[in-house]
Image (cartoon, grey):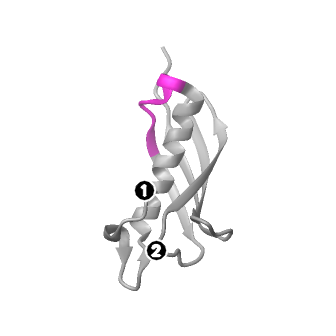
């Protein structure tokens, strides 16, 4: 996620909603990468995020692992980092409902 002033909170830290959006989008992209067009209609049913440390005002990266890819649900884990930094700034678990195959 490219750094932009509009996603900063007072004090110069990346906002929670911006990180939440990055986590949600990143897991969605991983589902599409795994399922192809069959995953396009996946919808978020739950997303839980833990903010671990204050992120710097810079680009953010997400590393995603799909934990489960079933017939009806997909569960993914997103680990968020400030670009160039080793410490994770947020950790999210997301569940998506998958469209019926048919």
Residue 76 sits above or below residue 20 on the image: above
Asked whether the beta carbons under mark 1 and mark 2 sit within 8 Å of each other, the answer is: no
Q: Considering depth in this image, is 96 or 59 the residue closer to the camera?
A: 59
Q: Is residue 79 left or right of residue 42?
A: right
Q: Decide: few, some or many residues near mark 1? Use Cα within 10 Å; few <14, some 14-19, many ≥20.
A: few
Q: Of the numbered discs in the image, which one, if any, rests on residue 33?
A: none
Circle nearer the N terminus (1, 2)? 1
Q: Which circle, 1 or 2, is nearer the viewer?
A: 2
Residue 86 at x, y percent in the picture: 68, 68
Between the C-alphas of marks 1 and 2, the distance is 16 Å
Q: Quadrant of residue 88?
A: bottom right
Q: Residue at x 36, y 68 (%)?
A: 7
Q: Of the numbered discs in the image, which one, if any, rests on residue 57?
A: 2
Q: Decide: few, some or many residues near mark 2? Use Cα within 10 Å; few <14, some 14-19, many ≥20.
A: some
Q: Total label count?
A: 2
Residue 5 part of the magenta-drawn span: no
Residue 77 sits above or below residue 40 on the image: below
Residue 43 part of the magenta-drawn span: yes
Residue 67 at x, y percent in the picture: 68, 43
Describe the element under mark 1 as helix, strand or loop.
Answer: helix
Q: Which residue of the protein is positioned furthest toward the left in this rendering?
A: 6
Residue 31 at x, y percent in the picture: 55, 36
Q: Which residue of the protein is positioned furthest toward the bottom in this rendering?
A: 11
Q: Residue at x 60, y 74 (%)?
A: 52
- The boundaries of the magenta stretch are 36-44
Q: Residue at x 41, y 81 (%)?
A: 12
Q: Considering depth in this image, is 75 or 26 the residue closer to the camera?
A: 26
- Circle 1 sits on which residue? 21
Q: Residue at x 51, y 48 (%)?
A: 26
């Amino acid at each position: 996620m490219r750094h932009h002033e509009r996603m900063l909170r007072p004090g110069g830290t990346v906002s929670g909603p911006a990180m939440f959006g990055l986590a949600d989008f990143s897991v969605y992209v991983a589902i599409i990468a795994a399922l192809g067009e069959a995953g396009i209609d996946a919808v978020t049913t739950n997303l839980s995020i833990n903010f671990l440390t204050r992120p710097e005002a810079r680009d953010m990266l997400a590393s995603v692992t799909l934990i489960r890819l079933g017939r009806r649900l997909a569960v993914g884990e997103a680990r968020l980092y400030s670009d160039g930094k080793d410490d994770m700034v947020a950790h999210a678990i997301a569940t998506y409902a998958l469209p019926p195959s048919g």
